[in-house]
Image (cartoon, helix red, strand yellow):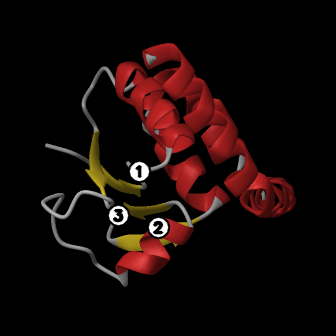
Amino acid sequence: MAMLTVWYDGGCPLCRREIALMQRLDRNRAILFVDVANPAGGSCPIDRADLLARFHARENGVMVSGAAAFAAMWRVIPRLRLLGLAARVPWVLAMMEGAYVTFLKIRPHLQRVARRLERERVG
């Protein structure tokens, strides 16, 4: 049974790659991954647009987003646990959140590049 629920944008090539890696690393199957882009993906605890705009997780019944959601995910993956624990230090989490917000600003460009590379690989 999953100990953590993660909602992700399965329509985003970057997100798909990240989640595929996390699924491989989650050997204990402690995370329930929910693809928000898939209408059959399950119920959304908050607005679907909000779930698609930022990375979200539910840890111990509490919804977290952004860097805090990544840190929650890392804490249940043994190889990444120390990084997730480091994020409990307020200034570390603040730095990670700043990096995440910066990433969100360039995400559309990176998505276009990733989609183009996917098409070239398939074509």
Amino acid at pointer 1: Gly
Along the line of sight, which residue is nearer the eye, 84 or 47? Answer: 47
What label does residue 11 carry, if any? 1
**What residue appears at the point 74 percent right and 50 percent down from the top-left corner?**
109
Q: Which residue is mark 3?
A: 60
| Percent x, y of residue 72 | 51, 51
Q: Please, what secondary structure does the residue beneath circle 3 have?
A: loop
How many numbered tags mark residues here?
Answer: 3
**What residue appears at the point 56 percent right and 32 percent down from the top-left corner?**
81
Label 2: how many Cα within 10 Å (few below 14, some 14–19, many 20+): some
Q: Are marks 1 and 2 in contact (CB under 8 Å)?
A: yes
Amino acid at pointer 2: Leu
Q: Does residue 42 appear left or right of residue 88 in this picture? A: left
What label does residue 52 carry, if any? 2
| Percent x, y of residue 9 | 43, 55
Res. 47 in view: yes
**What residue appears at the point 79 percent right and 63 percent down from the top-left corner?**
105
The quadrant of the rendering that contains the N terminus is top left
Q: Does residue 109 appear left or right of residue 13 in this picture? A: right
